[in-house]
Amino acid sequence: GFDPLIQILRPVSPLAWLPLGLVLFENSAPAALFTIAICAMWPTVLNTAVGVRAIPQDYLNVAKVLKLSRTKTLFKVLIPATLPYMFTGFRLSLGIAWLVIVAAEMLTGKTGVGSFLWNEYNNANYGNIIFSILTIGIIGYVLDRVMSVVEGRFKTA
C-alpha cells in the first residue's frame, strides 16, 4: 500500500530535501540531519520489506503450530529471517548517508570533508580536491567494513 508513496519520495535528490529541511527547522544542522535521514532510509525500508515477503510460509506455519505469540513470532521468526535483508539495506543506507553528509557539508558550509572539498575547489587547490575525494572514498570503505563486521556478529549470535 505504501509502495507508490515510497517510489515517489525515494528518488528525490538530497539537494531537494535540504531546502525543505531548512524551512522546517530554520537551522542548518537539524536540516542536514533531516536530509540525511530521509535520503538514507529507503534502502533499509525496501530491503526489509523484501525480506519479510521472502520468509517461507513454512516458518509462519510452524510458529502457528507452536502457538507463538505475535511478539515471539516477531523475535523468533520474522526478525531472524529478515536480518540478512535488513543488513543489506543498512549497508546501502550507510553509503547513501555518507554521500548526503558530504553534500550537506558542501551546501551548508558546515565544517567537514565536504566543506573542505568545496573550499579547496574555490581556491583552485586541485591536489587537495583529489585528497578529499580519496578521503571520502576511504571513509566510505571503512564504514562499510565496520557494518560488515557488525553484520557478522549478528550472524554468529
Image: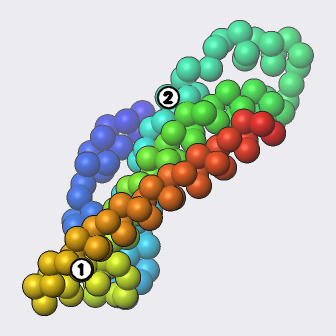
Q: Looking at the picture, which amino acid does disc 2 mark? A: Val
Distance from the alpha carbon under mark 2 to that under mark 1? 42 Å
- For mark 1, what is the residue? 128
Counting other residues with Cα less than 10 Å from the Cα at mark 2, is it few (<14), some (14-19), or many (20 or more)? some
Residue 56: image location, x then y, percent: 64, 14
- The structure residue drawn at horizontal position 19% and vertical position 78%, both measured from the top left corner, is 127
Residue 88: image location, x then y, percent: 51, 39
Q: Relative to the observer, which residue lies in front, 148 or 138?
A: 138
Q: Relative to the observer, which residue lies in front, 7 or 54?
A: 54
Q: Which of marks 2 and 1 is nearer the N terminus?
A: 2
Counting other residues with Cα less than 10 Å from the Cα at mark 1, is it few (<14), some (14-19), or many (20 or more)? some
* Mark number displayed over residue 31: none
132 displayed left or right of 1: left
- For mark 2, what is the residue? 50
- The structure residue drawn at horizontal position 71% and vertical position 9%, both measured from the top left corner, is 58
Q: Are marks 2 and 1 in contact (CB under 8 Å)?
A: no
Question: With respect to residue 15, does 22 lie above or below?
Answer: below
Residue 153: image quadrant is: top right
- The structure residue drawn at horizontal position 64% and vertical position 36%, both measured from the top left corner, is 83
